[in-house]
Amino acid sequence: MSKLLSAEEISQRVSQLSDWKLEGNKLQCVKIFKNFVEAISFVNQLVDPAEASQHHPDIEISYNKVIINLTTHDVGSLTEKDFSMAKQISALD
């Protein structure tokens, strides 16, 4: 099981991610694309890193908008796994 991060650790890590914000006990990133095809293409890029790390984001798609939420469900909040995945997702742009 992953180690739950303290509020201070979470705050520090969130400040290092330019396109992510804290939403309750989740990290959230909103991406806007030119159209639906680009949005789906981006979502498809999430598969390999998520599978490799066995850490899967919650994803919402609305035409050209993709909302990604990360949390470690088995501990009910944020762990290093979430921040590591957020960095990998940010690198996909």
Image (spheres, grey):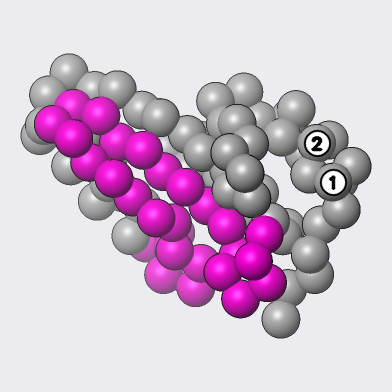
- Relative to 80, does residue 30 appear above or below in the rendering? above
Count neighbours of disc 1 (C-alpha within 10 A) and say few if under 14, some if 14 to 19, many if 20 or more.
Answer: few
Residue furthest bottom in the image? 1
Question: Foreground: 13 or 42?
Answer: 13
Residue 52 in percent (x, y) is at: 47, 69
Left or right of 24, for residue 46: left
Amino acid type at image mark 1: Ala
Mark number displayed over residue 39 = none
Asked whether residue 26 appears in the rendered view, the answer is yes
Query: Which of the 4 image quadrants contains residue 64?
Result: top left
Mark 2 and mark 1: Cα distance apart in space: 6 Å
Amino acid type at image mark 2: Ser
Q: Secondary structure at mark 1?
A: helix
Asked whether residue 91 appears in the rendered view, the answer is no
Q: Which residue is mark 2?
A: 11
Q: Secondary structure at mark 2?
A: helix
Identify the residue at image location x=80%, y=36%: 11
Question: Foreground: 52 or 85?
Answer: 85
> Are circles 2 and 1 on residues that touch, CB within 8 Å?
yes
Q: Which residues are magenta?
A: 48-77
Q: Which residue is mark 1?
A: 7
Left or right of 64, for residue 77: right
Count neighbours of disc 2 (C-alpha within 10 A) and say few if under 14, some if 14 to 19, many if 20 or more.
Answer: few
User: Is residue 59 found inside the magenta-colored segment of the image?
Assistant: yes
Query: Which of the 4 image quadrants contains residue 71?
Result: bottom right
- Relative to 88, does residue 37 appear above or below in the rendering? above
Residue furthest front in the image? 24
- Relative to 16, does residue 1 appear above or below in the rendering? below
